Amino acid sequence: MTFTQDFTAVGDSLAWSAIVAIIPILYFFWALAIKKMKGYVAGVTTLLVSLALAVIAFKVPVGTALMSASQGAVYGLMPIGWIIVTSVFLYNITVKTGHFNIIRHSVLSITEDRRIQALLVAFSFGAFLEGAAGFGAPVAISAALLVGLGFNPLYAAGLCLIANTAPVAFGAIGVPITAMEGPTGISAIEISKMVGRQLPFLAVFIPFFLVFIMTGFKKAWEVMPAILVSGISFAVTQFLSSNFLGPELPDVLSALVSLVALAVFMKFWQPKTIYRFPSEQHVATDDVVSKENYSGAAIVKAWSPFIILTVFISLWGIPTIKSALTGHYEGTNFILKGVNAIGQALTFMPEVPLLHNQVINGTTGDPIAAVYKLELLGAAGTAILLATIVSKFIFNMPWREWGKTFLETINEIKYPLITICSVVAYAYVTNAAGMMTTLGLVLAKTGALFPFFSPVLGWIGVFITGSDTSSNVLFAKLQQVTAESVGMDPVLALAANSSGGVTGKMISPQSIAVAAAAVGLAGRESELLRFALKYSLVLLFFICIITFLQSNVLAWMIP
């Protein structure tokens, strides 16, 4: 039984349909921020609300709605949930074997100042992981590292969510940008150039914003030299690489340059006063940094899980290798052909019953394919799992202890996994019903003000789907067509969708669940949402202003 999306399903009115479509979003905010439900309860009930509205208001067949939810739940487990499990597992291995103490010491040896540590770990290292892997790995790993260094779990998670805005558009080797080329026919390099003329402004601001949130203006001003080194080095590299190299490497290069620049700078400059959290003001300096002197080899060994992780996820992100890992390699390289055979055996893409080609796109009239995408070898989480196996041998960890730690990790994050699966399922239900496109069509009615509201589409898309890539695929064509109708450059509209989307990443239910799981805050997702929401709106407004100015006053910035 086919279902054709109807964007005016409620009373034959786009306005009424949009009001109904936004109810699940408002409910989720209410459930977490006001009612303070546990994350998995808010996620499951939001899914139920969206299913009811899809069936009753948007006339989606019950079977179609339920199977779209199942497709989302499977995607929530693989690859998203798999990344979270393996990321937290890798961190737990370093803690269990005692090597995290050495990691902590090595960071503190650069600086004991908590402000600089946040810049090094949350901003630079997190951006590197975003560029290499994307999904939930950057927030999960960097937040866990900050907690290990002594940060309050809520602050650690919140700061990493905010820091993860600047690199998201170029995450996972530029996939969010390249994903827009197919639906629109606009070259990915042109979109990359435009995004690279928006996000560097945000990248310069984010380091200051992080420290300001932590300490206030006065304490942030004390480390302004370090903030400027971190932000400017990142922004300049992001601009140059996005405009001259393409969308694949801006995050990786920017993060490395920023990380090295700040670490070197700290060898020649230190703040006049060392900032620590109020709860640790009584701790003497000699107590904060262990008097034990670790050798360079010991430090490298302690960091080796994350070095290996970086190597693996970087390899997994290379297009040719990625195609082999997922069974789609068509070249002649003997090794890659062997990997491709294994990838094919471990890739399962069965059609979703009652859903595959049963939903007709209300805009194009084409049937929408629906499969359970299970790329077991090609998933980023598998790359992280391999890093845990190599780390087990480096640390001489018994298999029994390794397995026990893995089971403990799963038990630790079982509720966040439920949250993730339910909110991704909710996203798939709203997409199948056409509820997301309905909201997009309302914003497209803003006419001359569309350049200002264009980033809001991306923000909504990422909030719902948890992915800048998904948001870009969902709204790219709508952005392009609407921009052309109101006299806005389509390249700017596509860039705005991606740039606006990055500001929604920090409050996406998936991101909130991932961050909470990584720092042991399962069940306290509402606190994290309240922490991040206001900052998300501030940064979104910042992108809206930039886009509006670039469309009307600073048009020379458009490539």
Image (cartoon, helix red, strand yellow):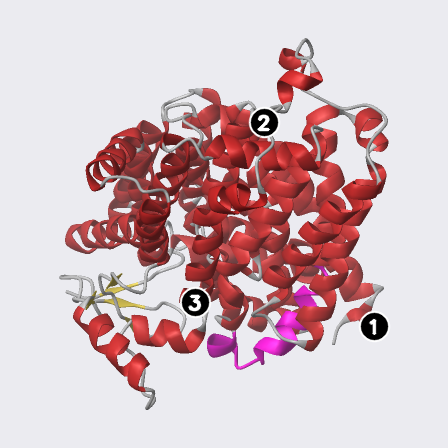
- Between marks 3 and 1, how big is the CA–CA gap? 38 Å
Lower position in the chain sequence, tag 1 or tag 2: 2
- The residue carrying mark 2 is 292
Q: Is residue 197 magenta?
A: yes
- Name the residue rendered at 19%, 49% in the picture: 66
Instruction: Say which quarter of the image contains residue 47.
Output: top left
Query: Which residue is label 3 attached to?
Result: 315
Q: Nearer the viewer, residue 134 or 368?
A: 134
Q: CA distance from mark 2 to mark 3?
A: 36 Å
Which quarter of the rendering shows the N terminus? bottom left
Foreground: 474 or 407? 407
Q: Nearer the viewer, mark 3 or mark 1?
A: 3
Please provide percent x and percent y for residue 515. Answer: 46, 36
Q: For mark 1, what is the residue?
A: 556
Question: Can you give x and y, in whole percent of width and height, for residue 193 in the image?
Answer: 68, 72
- Between disc 1 and disc 2, the foreground one is 2
Q: Is residue 213 magenta?
A: no
Start and end of the magenta stretch? 181-198
Disc 1 marks a residue whose amino acid type is Trp
* Disc 2, SS: loop
